[in-house]
Image: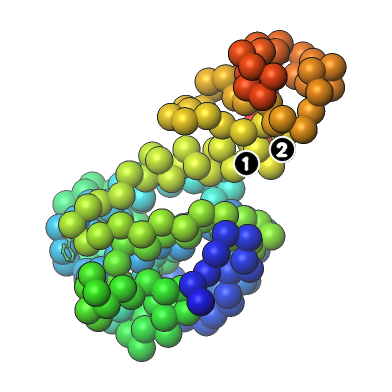
Amino acid sequence: MSLQLGDIAPNFTAVSTKGDIRFHNYIDGYWCILFSHPADFTPVCTTELGVTAKLHEEFDKRKVKVIALSVDSLEHHIKWIDDIELTQKVIVDFPIIADEDRSVATLYDMIHPNALQTLTVRCLYIIGPDKRIRLTLNYPASTGRNFNEILRVVESLQLTDQYQVATPANWQPSEDVIVVTSLSNEEARLKFPKGLHIVRPYLRYTPQPNLDH
Ligand code: BEZ
């Protein structure tokens, strides 16, 4: 059975460009983004890893560790990092797992043989500091992911963990959020002193509370 939201992200050991990884030790109370790409020295993957590297400060600010994976060898990864750094003009500071025996890819259901026979698809997990899976995503090889969207989800998860709110469709950080329906209007006014805008009894907005990262 595939991994589902709320499951504990399975532990593993792996070889990476930053040394051996014991995944649960790597998470170490941080948020974690574990993501696969199909292959090194391919165009879309090069841009994805470049963009991820450029978001380094944004991930740091939110206490997020990033770790990439493909079934290429460590030697390939190391050579490819040089290329990513040259072409994308960025330092790749996160580990890339060399999953040559496909053990992590199999554990995390990253190979979808009817889409891409032996390579990993663009699979991504957001994992919380408690090691529980909070988001799963699978994109085809031909479509690069939007890592600003991944950051937006992290921001929403951190906010909704901290406050009794949810984020509406297309929400962007700093925009109004939805108050959960389990709070009465009186409770909501106390908890959200910035104000309560009642559209329907089940649809109530408040300005975004401040987020402690
Ligand atoms: C790419 O990154 O461009 C790519 C990788 C594998 C298959 C197709 C495209």
Q: Which residue is drawn at 33% across and 85% down?
A: 100
Q: Quadrant of residue 130?
A: bottom right
Residue 141 point in image, percent of width and height: 22, 61
Q: Which residue is drawn at 69% across and 19% down?
A: 201
Name of the residue lying farthest toward the bottom: 101
Q: How many labels sit on residues?
A: 2
Q: Can residue 87 be seen in this view?
A: yes
User: What amino acid is at disc 2?
Assistant: Gln
Q: In this view, does 146 lie to the left or right of 205?
A: left
Name of the residue lying farthest toward the front: 201
In this view, the residue in front, 134 or 173, is 134
Is the residue 11 above or below the residue 153 in the image? below
Task: Residue 162: give its label.
Answer: 2
In this view, the residue in front, 206 or 148, is 206
Q: Is residue 78 visible?
A: no
Circles 1, 2 touching at the beta carbon (< 8 Å): yes
Sort mark 2 into few (<14), some (14-19) or many (20+) by Cα contacts within 10 Å: some
Q: CA separation, marks 1 and 2?
A: 6 Å
Q: Residue at x 18, y 57 (%)?
A: 142
Residue 209 point in image, percent of width and height: 67, 24
Label 1, on which residue? 158
Q: Residue at x 52, y 82 (%)?
A: 13
